[in-house]
Image (cartoon, coloured by chain):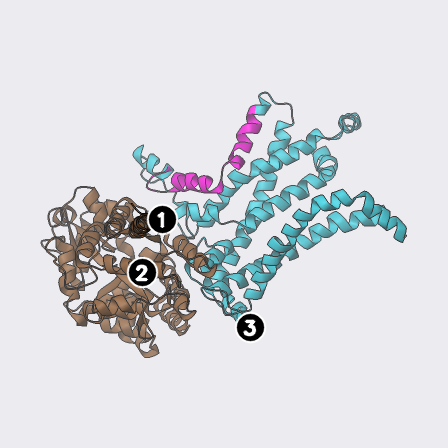
Chain colours: A brown, B cyan
C-alpha cells in the first residue's frame, strides 16, 4: 500500500467519522414550562418523546407555577441567555416581548402547515402579531364548562341537565331544597372570575362578551343586558356553601365527585380530577358547554414562544419543535392527557372523550368561537376586572357601583 | 489633624479592607436596587422595565386603586393590634417566667417555638384550625354543638383578626425572649432596695424595670414593625387576600403586580410608598437611638 493511498484512506475515514459525529449531534432544545402535576407532566412527555424520536434532544426545564415559570423565561430572555422555547398562556402575556423584538417568528412552519386555514380565528389572532406568527398554540382549553354530579341531580329530582339559564336556576333551587350544595365554588379570585365570565357568556351572550371585554364599549357596559349579567351573578350568592372562600378548584371539584354539590363552573382540566377518581362521563358526571343555543365557546389554552437567536442550530430546533408539537398525531395524544382539545380541526377526534368531542363540534362553528378575556386585554387591566368581580361577590357592592367600576377599569 | 487622620486610616487599613465587600454589596445591591425601583416608579413599565418618564402618573393610578387603599387600611389595623397585643402579651409572659417558676426552660421553649416556624407553616395551621369545614367548628358540630360558629377565615369582617391571631401567636414569643433577657440583666440590688421601701411589685416593673429595658423594648418594636411591613407569606398561606379583597396587604399587592399582572411601574410605585412610610416611621426611632445619645456624650 503506497503512502498516497494511506493518506487518502485515512482522510476518508476521518471524513466518515466526523460525518457520523455530525449526524449524531442531536438538536438540543431547552424548554421552560410549568406543567408539573401528574397529568400535565405525562402530557408534556408526549412532546419530549416525539421530539427525541425525530432526532432532537429535549432538555426539560420545569418551573413550578405559571407566573414563576414565565418570569424565569422572561428573565433569561432579557438577560441574553434564552431557552429554546418557553410556555405561555394563549393571551397577551408575550405581546410586549414581541414588541421589543425578543422573539423569533415561526412563519416558515406556519405557512408550510397552512395555519391560516386550520387554526380557529381567536387562537390565530392571539399568536399572530403584525402579520407574523410568533407563538405555537398547542391546546385549547375552554375555561367555562359547567360540570354536574349525576347522583346529586338525581337525588334532587332533576330529570335532565339544564339547557337554559331558567332551567339552571330551577335546578339550583331543587338542589338547595334537597339539602345539597347547589353551586360548588372555590372562593379564589380567578374562580369567582370564571363564574362571572360564565354568567356573562350565558346570560349576556357572545356579542356582549366581545363588546364589553373586547371593544370596552361604554354603551355595552352600561346596557340593560350587562346590568342583567351583574344582577344574575349576584343572585347566585345564596347557592354557594359557607366554606367556599379560599378553597382550591380541585377540592371544589371533589365536592361533585363525592356528590355533595350539584354544579361547578370550571375549565376542562377538571376532567382530570374526575378521571383520577375513576368517574365516568354520563354515568357519574356530565359537562354542559353553555346555557343557550348560541353560547360562545371561549378559547383559552397554552402556546410556546421561541426567543430570539441567530444560532442556526437553535432556529432549526425551534422549527422542529413547532412542527412536532402541532402535528395531528401528537396533538391528539397530548390533548387527551392534558384534558384540552387539539388546536386544529383536521384531526381524528374518535379517541377523544365525549366532552372533548362535544367541544370540537361546537368549536367547528366559527360564530361560536370567542377569545378568552386574557386575549382581549393586558394582564394589568384584566387584574383590575378580577378585583371588581371578587369584591362584587364578597361585599355588598351595589350593581350601580359595580357597573361604574367596570367602566372605569376597562377604560384603562 | 491631617497627620492624625492618616495615622488613623493606616492603623485601621485592614479593617477598612475587610469592610469593603460588605460596603460594595450594600451600596450596589441594596441602595442601588432601591434607587432603580424608585426610578422605575416614574416610568410606564409594564412587563419589562422601560426608561421613559411619566411623572407621578403611577402614583395617581395607585391611589385611585380600591385594592391598594384596602391594603393600606388593613395594614394599619393589623399593625395596631399586632404591635399592641404582641408587646403586652410578650412582656407579661416574660415577667411571669421571671418569677422563678418551675420548668422555666419548658415554658420558654413552648412560647418561643412558634417563632422558629416559618410564616407559611403558621398560616396554614391557623387556616386549618379556623376553616369551618376542617377545624374547630367542624369538630364542635361533630360533637353535637351544631350552633357553634367559628368562621373567621371565611368571614370578610373577621378575617383580619384571624390573621392578627396567627401573627400574634407567632411573634409574641420573640418579645418574651428579648424582654426576659433584659429582666435577667436587672441588678438584684434594685429589687432589694424596692422591697425595703415597700413598693408593690407591679409598680417596680412599670416605673423602674421597664424604663430600664428601653433598648430591649425598642429592638422588639422595630423587629415587630419590620415583620408587619413585609407581611406577605402568612396572608398568602391563610387567605390569599380573601374573601374578596378583605385581607389584602401592601406587600401582596406589590408582588401580584410585579409578577402576575406584569405591571412593574405600579408595583414599584407601591413599594416606593411603602419605603417612604417605613422611613417616616423609623425616623423618630433612629433619632432617639443615635442622635440623642451622641448629644449626651458631647
- Residue toward you, B213 or A143: A143
Q: Quadrant of the N terminus of chain A?
A: top left
> For residue A367, what is the image quadrant?
bottom left
Residue B76 position (above or below residue A130): above
- The chain carrying label 1 is A
Q: Position of residue B258 (x, y in %)?
A: 47, 59
Q: Is residue B114 magenta?
A: yes
- First to last magenta residue range: B106-135
Between tags 2 and 3, which lies in front? 2
Question: Do tag 2 and tag 1 residues touch (Cβ < 8 Å)?
Answer: no
- Say what secondary structure mark 3 lies in: loop
Q: Residues within 10 Å of mark 1 (few under 14, many from 20)?
A: some
As drawn, the label of residue B288 is none
Residue that carries the numbered disc 2 in the rendered image: A316
Q: How many marks?
A: 3
Q: CA–CA distance between discs 3 and 1?
A: 37 Å
Residue that carries the numbered disc 1 in the rendered image: A62
- Say what secondary structure mark 1 lies in: strand
Residue A141 position (above or below residue B95): below
Q: Residue at x 28, y 57 (%)?
A: A321
Q: Are marks 2 and 1 on the same chain?
A: yes
- Say what secondary structure mark 2 lies in: helix
- Residue toward you, B19 or A301: B19
- Residue toward you, A272 or A349: A349
Q: Judge from the rendering whether residue A316 lies leftward or rightward of residue B54; answer left or right.
A: left
Q: CA–CA distance between discs 2 and 3?
A: 40 Å
Q: Are marks 2 and 3 on the same chain?
A: no
- The chain carrying label 3 is B
Residue that carries the numbered disc 3 in the rendered image: B53
Residue B19 position (above or below residue A313): above
Q: Position of residue A405 (x, y in %)?
A: 40, 69
Q: Position of residue A70 (x, y in %)?
A: 39, 56
Amino acid at each position: 500500500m503506497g503512502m498516497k493511498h494511506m493518506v487518502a484512506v485515512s482522510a476518508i475515514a476521518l471524513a466518515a467519522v466526523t460525518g457520523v459525529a455530525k449526524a449524531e449531534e442531536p438538536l438540543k432544545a431547552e424548554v421552560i414550562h410549568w406543567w408539573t402535576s401528574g397529568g400535565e407532566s405525562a402530557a408534556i412527555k408526549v412532546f419530549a418523546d416525539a421530539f427525541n424520536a425525530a432526532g432532537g434532544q429535549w432538555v426539560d426545564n420545569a418551573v413550578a407555577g405559571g407566573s414563576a415559570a414565565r418570569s424565569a423565561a422572561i428573565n433569561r430572555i432579557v438577560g441574553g441567555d434564552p431557552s429554546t422555547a418557553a410556555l405561555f398562556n394563549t393571551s397577551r402575556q408575550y405581546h410586549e416581548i414581541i414588541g421589543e423584538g425578543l422573539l423569533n417568528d415561526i412563519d416558515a412552519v406556519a405557512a408550510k402547515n397552512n395555519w391560516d386555514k386550520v387554526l380557529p380565528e381567536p387562537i390565530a389572532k392571539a399568536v399572530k402579531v403584525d402579520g407574523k406568527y410568533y407563538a405555537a398554540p398547542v391546546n385549547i382549553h375552554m375555561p367555562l364548562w359547567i360540570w354536574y354530579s349525576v347522583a346529586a341531580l338525581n337525588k334532587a329530582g332533576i330529570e335532565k341537565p339544564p339547557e337554559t339559564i331558567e332551567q339552571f336556576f330551577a335546578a339550583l333551587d331543587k338542589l338547595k331544597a334537597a339539602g345539597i350544595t347547589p353551586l360548588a365554588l372555590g372562593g379564589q379570585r380567578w374562580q369567582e372570575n370564571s363564574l362571572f365570565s360564565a354568567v356573562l357568556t350565558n346570560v349576556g351572550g357572545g356579542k356582549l362578551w366581545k363588546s364589553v371585554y373586547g371593544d370596552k364599549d361604554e354603551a355595552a357596559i352600561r346596557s340593560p343586558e350587562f346590568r342583567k349579567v351583574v344582577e344574575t351573578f349576584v343572585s347566585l350568592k345564596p347557592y354557594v356553601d359557607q366554606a367556599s372562600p379560599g378553597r382550591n378548584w380541585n377540592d371544589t371539584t371533589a365536592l361533585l365527585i363525592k356528590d355533595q354539590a350539584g354544579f361547578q363552573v370550571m375549565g376542562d382540566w377538571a376532567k382530570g380530577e374526575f378521571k383520577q377518581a375513576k368517574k365516568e362521563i354520563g354515568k357519574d358526571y356530565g359537562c354542559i358547554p353553555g346555557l343557550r343555543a348560541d353560547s360562545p365557546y371561549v378559547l383559552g389554552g397554552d402556546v410556546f414562544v421561541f426567543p430570539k437567536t441567530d444560532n442556526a442550530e437553535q432556529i432549526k430546533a425551534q422549527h422542529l419543535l413547532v412542527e412536532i408539537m402541532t402535528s395531528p398525531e401528537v396533538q391528539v395524544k397530548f390533548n387527551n392527557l392534558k384534558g384540552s382539545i387539539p388546536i386544529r380541526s383536521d384531526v381524528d377526534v374518535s379517541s377523544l372523550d365525549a366532552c372533548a368531542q362535544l367541544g370540537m363540534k361546537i368549536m367547528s362553528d366559527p360564530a361560536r368561537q370567542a377569545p378568552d378575556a386574557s386575549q382581549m386585554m393586558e394582564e394589568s387591566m384584566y387584574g383590575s376586572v378580577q378585583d371588581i368581580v371578587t369584591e362584587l361577590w364578597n361585599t355588598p357592592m351595589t350593581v350601580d357601583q359595580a357597573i361604574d367600576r367596570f367602566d372605569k377599569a376597562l377604560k384603562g | 489633624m491631617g497627620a492624625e487622620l492618616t495615622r488613623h486610616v493606616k492603623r485601621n487599613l485592614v479593617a477598612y479592607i475587610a469592610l469593603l465587600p460588605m460596603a460594595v454589596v450594600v451600596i450596589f445591591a441594596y441602595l442601588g436596587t432601591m434607587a432603580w425601583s424608585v426610578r422605575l416608579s416614574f416610568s410606564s413599565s409594564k412587563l419589562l422595565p422601560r426608561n421613559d418618564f411619566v411623572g407621578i402618573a403611577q402614583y395617581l393610578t395607585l391611589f385611585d386603586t380600591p385594592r391598594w387603599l384596602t391594603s393600606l387600611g388593613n395594614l394599619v389595623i393589623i399593625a395596631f393590634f399586632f404591635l399592641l397585643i404582641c408587646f403586652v402579651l410578650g412582656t407579661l409572659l416574660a415577667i411571669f417566667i421571671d418569677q422563678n417558676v418551675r420548668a422555666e426552660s419548658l415554658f420558654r421553649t413552648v412560647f418561643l417555638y412558634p417563632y422558629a416556624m416559618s410564616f407559611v407553616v403558621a398560616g396554614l395551621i391557623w387556616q386549618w384550625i379556623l376553616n369551618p369545614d376542617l377545624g374547630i367548628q367542624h369538630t364542635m358540630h361533630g360533637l353535637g354543638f351544631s350552633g357553634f360558629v367559628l368562621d373567621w377565615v371565611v368571614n370578610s369582617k373577621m378575617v383580619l383578626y384571624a390573621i392578627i391571631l396567627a401573627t400574634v401567636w407567632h411573634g409574641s414569643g420573640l418579645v418574651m425572649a428579648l424582654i426576659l433577657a433584659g429582666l435577667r440583666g436587672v441588678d438584684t440590688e434594685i429589687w432589694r432596695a424596692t422591697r425595703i421601701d415597700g413598693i408593690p411589685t407591679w409598680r417596680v416593673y412599670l416605673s423602674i424595670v421597664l424604663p430600664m429595658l428601653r433598648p430591649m423594648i425598642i429592638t422588639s418594636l422595630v423587629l415587630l414593625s419590620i415583620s408587619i411591613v413585609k407581611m406577605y407569606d402568612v396572608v398568602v398561606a391563610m387567605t390569599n387576600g380573601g374573601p374578596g379583597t378583605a385581607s389584602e396587604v401592601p406587600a401582596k399587592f406589590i408582588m401580584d403586580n410585579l409578577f402576575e399582572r406584569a405591571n412593574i411601574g405600579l408595583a414599584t410605585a407601591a413599594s416606593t410608598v411603602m419605603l417612604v412610610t417605613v422611613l417616616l416611621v423609623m425616623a423618630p426611632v433612629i433619632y432617639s437611638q443615635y442622635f440623642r445619645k451622641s448629644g449626651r456624650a458631647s
